[in-house]
Image (cartoon, coloured by chain):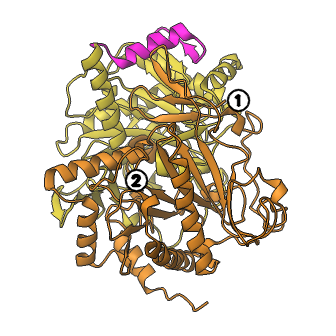
Chain colours: A yellow, B orange
C-alpha cells in the first residue's frame, strides 16, 4: 500500500509508492517510445488494461470491447489505491496517511495516434468532456479532495506509452501548488476585491504582446513570469473555479482552442515532448470568486538542474513575448 | 540584461535570461559529456574562463595561471549579471527588477576528474571552505540577499561540462523554497519553542532506520518525506543558520562525510547523475535559532512529469528506509 508522507518543514506531501518500481534499484533509461510495439490502448486490445470505468461508445457495444471513442481505465501501476481508509496518523514527529486516491488513464482515441492535436476536433471535445465526467463522479467520494488532470507527451515528458492519453490523479489532500495558487488568489481578492484571473486577462489583452489566441470564451497567453520557454496558459474568460462546472458551449470552443495551441506549438518546436495540466479548485469548496480553473502547457525543452530544484527559481531563456509572437504567427494548415 | 519577474499568483520569481540561449529556438539535446574534449577548467587552460575571483594557490603563483588547487571564476553564461542597479518596478499589474546577482563557478580540482568524491579529502575540504569564503565576500554587497550553492553532476543532472565543479548563484530576493523552509521552521519554533532541525535529528537518531551516517558533528539521513529515490540530507548537529558561520573543525569533518556519502551513492547506483544543494539563511538575517543550513543530495533516477509539475507532489518509488539501509551497508574501499 502506498503512503502519503508530509514534509515537516514545508508541508509538502510525498507519495511513497514502492510498487511503482519494477525492481527497486533499476532506473535504466527506457528506449524511445515505439509506435510499432504492442499497444495496450488500441481498440481490440481492451483486455490489456484493467476494466474500463467509463467510455463513450457506439450504442449497443459492450464495456471492455471495441466500439468506443474515448475510454477511461484505472492506471495499471497506480501511484495511489482506490480501496481502503485514509488512517491519518503520526509517526513520531511526522504525519502520514495511507496512499488512498484514484489514478486513471484517459485513452484519447481508439487508433494509434500519438498527438491529441491531430485528432478531429469533436474527438478532442469528447476528451475534455470525459475529464469533466470523471471529476463529477470522483467528487462524490468524501475521502477525496482534489483531482489533477495532466498529460505527459513523449518520453522526455514522462510518458511510458506513445498512444495519446492523459491521466487523472485524485488525492486526499490539496496539492501544495494548487494550495499556493488558491492562497495567492485569495489574498489578491481580499486586498483588491477582484479576481486576479480577471485582472490578468484584462492586462494581457491590453498589453497584447503575450497573447497567442483571443477567442470569445478563452484567452491563450505565454504568462508574464513563464517558468519554461513557450509555457502557455489557456484561461477561461468566464471565471469559474471548478472545471467540472464548465458549460457545453465552453467545451465546444475549448476543443478548438486546445487543438490549435498544440498544433502551433508542435509546428514551432518540431513536435516537442510536453506536459499539460489542468488546475481546478478542490472538490470540497463551493464556487470561489477569487479562483479560476485553467490549463498550463509546457514543452520540455530545457533541463531543470540543481538551481531550480534548490531555489524554486526558474531560468527561462525565451522571453514570453518572443514565444507568444512566434506562436501567434504560425498558421495552422487546414485539415 | 536578464530580468527577474514575479509570478503574480504564487509569488515565485523567474529569471528571464535570453542571452543564456545560444540560439533562441535551438534546444537540441547535447551529446554525452566527454572527458576527451577540450577542458576549459584544466590547469593551464586558465585563459578559457573569465578572470578568477578567488583561488587557493601555491605561494608565489599568479592569478589566472597554473598553481591553484581550487578556483572560482564567473560563469561565462551567467543567469544574472553583477553590474547594475536593481531598478525594482511595476509593469502594469506585474512586478519586476533587473536580473542583478552573481553566478560563479567553483572549479574543484586542477586536473580532469569528474567526481568530487574521488578527490583527496583535503581537496574536498578546500572546496567546502571556498564556498564559505565566497558567501562571506558576497554578503557585503547590499543588493544581494541570498546565496545558493549547488552542483550538477552529469548531463542528466544539468551539467554542461564533465570536469568536477559546483556553482553559486546569489540573488537579490530570497528563493521561494528557502522562504518556505524558513517560514515552516519559524512556525514550528513559535509553536514548540524548539528548532525543527534539532527535533528531526533526535527523531532520526531514535528511529535509526533512515540514518546513513552518524558522526560527532553531522547526521546523514534519507528524509522521512524524501521526494526522490535515495534523496540524502547532511544536517549539522550544532544548529547554525548560516553556512558561512561554519567552524574549521566542522569543515574538517564535513569533507570526510560528504566524500563518504557521495562514494556510497556512486557505488550503490553505478555513478548516477546527481544534484546537491546547500540551503542556508539569507544574508540580511542574523543567526536564526529556528533554522539550520544543510545539504540536500538527490541522484537523478526518475523523470519528473506532469503530475509533479502540476501538483508539487512527488511520487517516490523507493522508501527512504530502504535507501538508507542500502547506503548504510555499502563499505567504502580504502583509498
The stretch of residues the image draws in magenta is A193-216
Q: Is residue B121 above or below residue B195?
A: below
Q: Residue furthest bottom?
A: B334
Residue B137 as seen in the image, left or right of residue A135 = right
Please provide percent x and percent y for residue A321.
62, 21
Question: Which quadrant does the C terminus of chain B fall into?
Answer: bottom right
Task: Name which residue lies at 27% across and 55% down.
Answer: B290
Q: Is residue B6 visible?
A: yes
Please provide percent x and percent y for residue B277.
50, 58
Task: Name which residue lies at 65% across and 50% down.
Answer: A35
Q: Secondary structure at mark 1?
A: helix
Disc 1 target residue: A267
Residue A54 as seen in the image, left or right of residue A334 = left
Q: CA distance from mark 2 to mark 1?
A: 31 Å
Does the magenta-highlighted stretch encompass residue A199? yes
Q: Secondary structure at mark 2?
A: strand
Query: Dot 2 surroundings within 10 Å: few (below 14), some, or many (20 or more)?
Result: many
Disc 2 target residue: B314
Q: Camera-side residue: A153 or B13?
A: B13
Which circle marks residue A162 in the picture? Answer: none
Amino acid at each position: 500500500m502506498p503512503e502519503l508522507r508530509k514534509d515537516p518543514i514545508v508541508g509538502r506531501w510525498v507519495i511513497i509508492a514502492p510498487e511503482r518500481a519494477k525492481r527497486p534499484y533499476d532506473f535504466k533509461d527506457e528506449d524511445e517510445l515505439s509506435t510499432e510495439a504492442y499497444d495496450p490502448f488500441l481498440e481490440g486490445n481492451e483486455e490489456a488494461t484493467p476494466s474500463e470505468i467509463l467510455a463513450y461508445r457506439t450504442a449497443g457495444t459492450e464495456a471492455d470491447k471495441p466500439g468506443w471513442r474515448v475510454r477511461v481505465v484505472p492506471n495499471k501501476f497506480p501511484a495511489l489505491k482506490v480501496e481502503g481508509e485514509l488512517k491519518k496518523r503520526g509517526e513520531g514527529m511526522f504525519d502520514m496517511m495511507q496512499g488512498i486516491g484514484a489514478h486513471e488513464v484517459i485513452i484519447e482515441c481508439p487508433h494509434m495516434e500519438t498527438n491529441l492535436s491531430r485528432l478531429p476536433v469533436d474527438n478532442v471535445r469528447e476528451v475534455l468532456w470525459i475529464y469533466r465526467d470523471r471529476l463529477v463522479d470522483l467528487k462524490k467520494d468524501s475521502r477525496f479532495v482534489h483531482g489533477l488532470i495532466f498529460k505527459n507527451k513523449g518520453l522526455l515528458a514522462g510518458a511510458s506509452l506513445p498512444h495519446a492519453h492523459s491521466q487523472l490523479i485524485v488525492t486526499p489532500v490539496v496539492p501544495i501548488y494548487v494550495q499556493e495558487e488558491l492562497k495567492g488568489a485569495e489574498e489578491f481578492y481580499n486586498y483588491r476585491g477582484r479576481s486576479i484571473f480577471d485582472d490578468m486577462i484584462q492586462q494581457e489583452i491590453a498589453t497584447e504582446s503575450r497573447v497567442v489566441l483571443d477567442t470569445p470564451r478563452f484567452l491563450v497567453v505565454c504568462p508574464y513570469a513563464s517558468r519554461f520557454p513557450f509555457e502557455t496558459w489557456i484561461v477561461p474568460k468566464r471565471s469559474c473555479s471548478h472545471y467540472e462546472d464548465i458549460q457545453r458551449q465552453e467545451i465546444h470552443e475549448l476543443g478548438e482552442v486546445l487543438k490549435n495551441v498544440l498544433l502551433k506549438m508542435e509546428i514551432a518546436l518540431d513536435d516537442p515532448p510536453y506536459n499539460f495540466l489542468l488546475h481546478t479548485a478542490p472538490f470540497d469548496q463551493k464556487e470561489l470568486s477569487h479562483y479560476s480553473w485553467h490549463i498550463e502547457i509546457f514543452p520540455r525543452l530545457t533541463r531543470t538542474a540543481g538551481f531550480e530544484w534548490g531555489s524554486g527559481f526558474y531560468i527561462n531563456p525565451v522571453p514570453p513575448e518572443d514565444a507568444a509572437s512566434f506562436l501567434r504567427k504560425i498558421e495552422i494548415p487546414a485539415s
